[in-house]
Every structure is written in C-alpha cells, then in structure tokens.
Image (tube, rainbow, N blue to C red):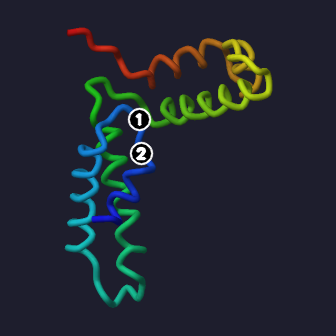
C-alpha cells in the first residue's frame, strides 16, 4: 500500500481527493498482481508502478464530463510551466502575449488551452 501512496503523491494538487486517487491506484496494484509473472525477471514494484500510474492517468483523463484532447492538456501543462518560469524571471505574472511568444504559439492558443484545462467552479 505504501507503493500506491508513493505513486499517488505525484498526482496531488490536480483537483482530486487523495483518497480517490489512492483507491484508483489500488485498482492498478490489483491489476498488476493479477498480471505479474515471475518469469519477467524484474522486481514486482518495477512492474507495478507503471500500471498504477496508468490507472490513475486513465482516471484523470476520462473523469471530466467534457473530454479535453491529450494534445490540449499537454499544451496546458507547457503553458503552466512557462508561466512559472516567466513569473520567476520577471518577478510578476506574465501576460498571455509573453507566454505565447515564449512558447512560439498564438495568444489564442494560450487562452484556449488554459480554459480547457481549468477545472470549472461549481456553485452550490
């Protein structure tokens, strides 16, 4: 179970409860137990970790009601990293134009990707 928890740590702060991710990770662990074969000549953890990661990634990818393409999610992650780097170097939050120039994409693509990967706020 510590193996699952160590993998879950990589996925925290993405808008999901740690307990939910842990449960999904346990499903990946069970699948790896079912499919592991001693003839693979690797440690069980070496085999299990990618399966646990895959199960969690599949959950995150398929969870939303509106499906966002993988390429748009990847662009959103690049934008987030660029925003962090530019914030450090400029000492302030960068503009959309600065991010676009840094990544050599259009400002419209920056806005589209950011909107696509932002979790909606639910008012109750």
Task: Mark 2: give few (<14), some (14-19) or many (20+) Cα within 10 Å.
Answer: some
Identify the image quadrant of the N terminus: bottom left
Report the residue marked by disc 2. 11
Q: On screen, 58 above or below 87?
A: below
Q: Residue at x 60, y 12 (%)?
A: 108
Q: Is residue 44 left or right of residue 124?
A: right
Task: Mark 1: give few (<14), some (14-19) or many (20+) Cα within 10 Å.
Answer: few
Residue 89, percent from left and from top: 79, 27
- How many labels, in total? 2
**Residue 16 sits in quarter:** top left
Dot 2: what SS? Answer: helix
Q: On screen, 63 above or below 43?
A: above
**Residue 67 sits in quarter:** top left
Q: Residue at x 33, y 49 (%)?
A: 56
Q: Is residue 123 left or right of residue 109?
A: left
Q: Residue at x 24, y 43 (%)?
A: 20
Identify the image quadrant of the C terminus: top left
Q: Residue furthest top?
A: 123
Marks 2 and 1, how far apart in space? 6 Å
Dot 1: what SS? Answer: loop
Residue 87, percent from left and from top: 71, 24
The answer to whether mark 2 and mark 1 are in CB contact below 8 A is yes
Q: Is residue 112 left or right of residue 15?
A: right
Q: Identify the mark at residue 61; answer none if there is no mark.
A: none
Report the residue marked by disc 1. 14
């Amino acid at each position: 179970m510590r193996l699952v928890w160590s993998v879950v740590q990589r996925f925290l702060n993405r808008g999901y409860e740690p307990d939910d991710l842990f449960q999904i990770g346990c499903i990946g662990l069970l699948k790896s137990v079912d499919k592991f074969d001693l003839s693979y000549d690797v440690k069980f953890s070496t085999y299990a970790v990618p399966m646990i990661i895959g199960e969690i990634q599949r959950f995150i990818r398929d969870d939303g009601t509106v499906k966002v393409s993988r390429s748009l999610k990847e662009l959103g992650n690049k934008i987030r990293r660029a925003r962090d780097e530019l914030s450090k170097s400029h000492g302030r939050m960068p503009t959309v134009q600065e991010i676009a120039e840094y990544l050599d994409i259009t400002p419209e693509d920056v806005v589209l990707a950011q909107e696509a990967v932002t979790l909606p706020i639910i008012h109750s």
